[in-house]
């Protein structure tokens, strides 16, 4: 009897797969084990359940399954890959997120003709940390495309030392500096095999995704004809960037093709395209301006890093005004429509960098012996570099109340409420505020913004 059930299962699976439309994006495929969960999918036009295919499994931070799978269709057609994108968000708890990631991988492996030696994970933004953790711990994961974020651990990588990672870094992304450090670090030179900078901060164009995927799949076993396909695809995208007058991006993309292909095929056409870009008058002008802006940006970044360490260590409250003026200047540059694009993007990166290093310092301070003054300074600084950082406001309120500075606590309570904070009950559980939370000032403030209060 069990053989009958097995036959029926195989027949059902074959029928289900035959009903899937090949060469098109299917937006809503239900999990076989959980009908509440769905994912989007693309199957190659020549898909045959008797063959084996690389699979790309995507976890978008906004759960845009069909949209991101569509963005990968050029890469999928080029490499003959299956592409899957989750239609649900990953949990914030690492263990739960890891389970979700592994479940989707298992679902695809069980239902489709997957080459289990060529499983590639893709993630962007807040999803990258969880996905990277799974990739590093799982020897069955061949590669990962990390978009705008990455977290690597040398100890974790020992579990999957052959993992290949390709980084796509938006030039307005919050982790721009962090990703560049990863790419230039000798610690991960055998793991990070690709790095491209693209325009913006959301999903990169299809050409970048195709280049990142072929970076991971390209190896000594790749047939020369297929290598040439990959090469021609990358060249065509570089040419497209050039024709669209995006000279700096074109140069950056095309220049990296030498390292990618020189050991496999003749790259004379890459050299010719690169020379055309370099000799273009507009490229030269943009390159000169970029050099000047980059020099200034690097100097400011070093300055921010130095002063953060000094000001935190010595609790230099007098320097908070300097930090505030620096943030105001960056904001003015970001929102100045007359400002050049290069300068505006530089300001976006610097602001994100300051927010990143300040939060990094805060995280480190939680595991160190930190004086009250330094803790208060750091949390006030967190509110200055990111006025929507509600956790920082709550910490300042708590620290101020702890020292009996109730006027400061009231001030930062109002600043917290101005951010749109709505957690009514939590406002009455902030540490060290017991002496003031039953008073009129505290309750009147809450009532003004939330329409009710507990004690008045």
Image (cartoon, grey):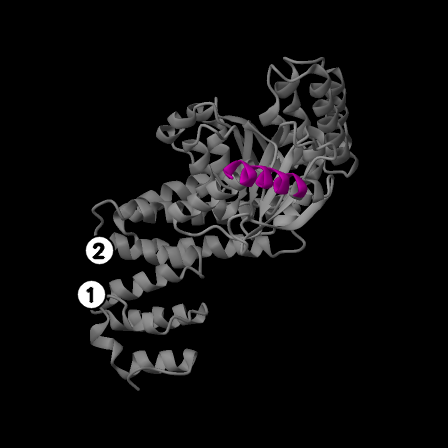
Q: Quadrant of residue 243?
A: top right
**Rendered position, 398 above or below 151:** below
Where's residue 230, x and y in %?
70, 25
* Closer to us: 317 or 267: 267
In magenta stretch: residue 13: yes
Gap in Å between the C-alphas at discs 2 and 1? 9 Å
Q: Quadrant of the C terminus?
A: bottom left
Is residue 118 rendered to the left or right of residue 360? right
106 displayed left or right of 265: left
Q: Residues within 10 Å of mark 1 (few under 14, many from 20)?
A: few
Query: 91 above or below 256?
Result: below
In screen coordinates, is 190 left or right of 74? left
Name the residue that disc number 1 marks.
Answer: 403
Residue 102 lies in the magenta-colored region? no
Along the line of sight, the residue nearer the viewer: 63 or 381: 63
Horizontally, residue 124 falls left or right of residue 413, namely right
Q: Is residue 453 visible?
A: yes
Q: What residue sits right under mark 2 in the picture?
A: 372
Q: Residue at x 48, y 48 (%)?
A: 126
| Residue at x 65%, y 27% (from the top left corner) | 51
The residue shown at (24%, 76%) is 436
Marks 2 & 1, CB-CB < 8 Å contact: yes
The main secondary structure of the magenta stretch is helix
Name the outermost residue toward the front.
1
Whole-percent x, y for residue 451 in the image: 42, 83
SS type, badge 1: loop
Q: Magenta segment, which residues?
A: 1-15
Picture layout, residue 250 above or below residue 222: below
């Amino acid at each position: 009897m069990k053989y009958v059930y097995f036959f029926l299962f195989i027949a059902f699976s074959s029928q289900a797969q035959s009903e899937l439309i090949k060469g098109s994006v299917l937006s809503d495929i239900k999990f076989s084990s959980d009908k509440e969960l769905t994912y989007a999918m693309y199957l190659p036009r020549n898909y045959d359940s008797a063959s084996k295919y690389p699979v790309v499994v995507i976890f978008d931070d906004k759960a845009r399954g069909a949209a991101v799978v569509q963005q990968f269709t050029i890469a999928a057609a080029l490499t003959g890959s299956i592409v899957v994108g989750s239609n649900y968000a990953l949990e914030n708890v690492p263990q739960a997120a890891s389970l979700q990631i592994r479940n989707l991988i298992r679902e695809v492996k069980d239902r489709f003709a997957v080459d289990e030696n060529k499983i590639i994970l893709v993630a962007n933004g807040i999803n990258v940390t969880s996905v990277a953790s799974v990739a590093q711990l799982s020897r069955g994961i061949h590669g990962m495309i990390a978009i705008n974020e990455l977290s690597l651990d040398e100890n974790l990588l020992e579990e999957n030392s052959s993992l290949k990672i390709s980084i796509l870094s938006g030039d307005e992304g919050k982790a721009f500096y962090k990703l560049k450090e990863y790419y230039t670090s000798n610690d991960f030179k055998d793991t990070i095999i690709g790095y491209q900078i693209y325009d913006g901060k959301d999903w990169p164009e299809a050409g970048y995704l195709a280049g990142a995927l072929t970076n991971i799949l390209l190896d000594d076993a790749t047939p020369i004809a297929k290598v040439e396909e990959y090469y021609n695809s990358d060249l065509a995208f570089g040419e497209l960037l050039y024709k669209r007058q995006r000279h700096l991006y074109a140069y950056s993309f095309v220049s990296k093709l030498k390292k990618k292909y020189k050991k496999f095929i003749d790259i004379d056409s890459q050299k010719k395209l690169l020379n055309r870009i370099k000799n273009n008058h507009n490229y030269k002008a943009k390159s000169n301006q970029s050099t000047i802006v980059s020099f200034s940006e690097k100097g400011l970044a070093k300055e921010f890093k130095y002063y953060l360490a000094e000001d935190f260590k010595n609790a230099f409250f007098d320097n908070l005004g300097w930090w505030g003026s620096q943030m105001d200047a960056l904001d003015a540059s970001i929102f100045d429509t007359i400002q050049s694009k290069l300068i505006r993007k530089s300001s976006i990166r610097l602001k994100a960098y300051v927010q990143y290093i300040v939060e990094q310092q805060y995280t480190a301070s939680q595991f160190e012996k930190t004086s009250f003054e330094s803790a208060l300074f750091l949390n006030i600084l967190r509110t200055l570099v990111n006025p929507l950082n509600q956790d920082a406001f709550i910490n300042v309120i708590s620290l101020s109340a702890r020292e009996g500075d109730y006027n400061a606590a009231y001030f930062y309570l109002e600043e917290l409420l101005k951010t749109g904070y709505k957690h009514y009950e939590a406002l009455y559980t902030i540490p060290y505020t017991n002496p003031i939370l039953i008073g009129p000032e505290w309750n009147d403030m809450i009532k003004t913004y939330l329409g009710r209060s507990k004690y008045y």
